[in-house]
Amino acid sequence: MNINGWLHHLSLNQTAAKFSIPNTGTISTWEKLYRSYGFSGLLAKKRGRPSMKKSKSKYKVNKPKKELSYVEKLEQEVYQLRMENDLLKKWHALMKQWEKEGRH
């Protein structure tokens, strides 16, 4: 008799249908785990390979940054200014839309 059957006198098939579980074997497995280990047997367990342990160093070592060339610095600045410009254009368009709707 399955766990749900203990309380409501249902068969494995009836229990599977009630909870939309496609395989009655799943319920049997859960029942065996519950009988052997109690509720803790039904809790999810970690699966797969354990992650690699990171070093427990308290201090991060900052890698020296690559020195950018003059052209790279200018390209970075142009990129930043373009982003700011796009943001301001969008903000301006939103303000115009709000004025039209009377929401300022």
Image: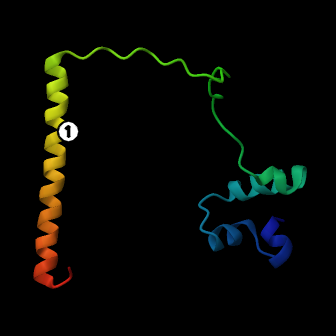
Q: Residue furthest bottom?
A: 102
10 Å crowding of disc 1: few (<14), some (14-19), many (20+): few
User: How many numbered marks have been drawn onto this rendered protein structure?
Assistant: 1
Rendering quarter of residue 12: bottom right
State the residue position of label 1. 80
Q: Is residue 94 above or below residue 51?
A: below
- Residue 48's spot in the image, x, y percent? 63, 32
- Residue 52's spot in the image, x, y percent? 62, 23
Q: Is residue 84 above or below residue 104?
A: above
Q: Nearer the viewer, residue 87 or 27?
A: 87
At x 18%, y 47%, the residue is 84
- Residue 82's spot in the image, x, y percent? 13, 42
Rendering quarter of residue 20: bottom right
Horizontal side of 25 relative to 4 (left or right) equals left
Q: Nearer the viewer, residue 51 or 35?
A: 51
Q: Nearer the viewer, residue 5 or 42?
A: 42
Horizontal side of 49 relative to 103 (left or right) equals right
Quarter holding the C terminus?
Answer: bottom left
At x 18%, y 45%, the residue is 83
Please name the amino acid that badge 1 sits on. Answer: Gln
Horizontal side of 49 relative to 67 (left or right) equals right
Quarter holding the N terminus?
Answer: bottom right
Rendering quarter of residue 78: top left
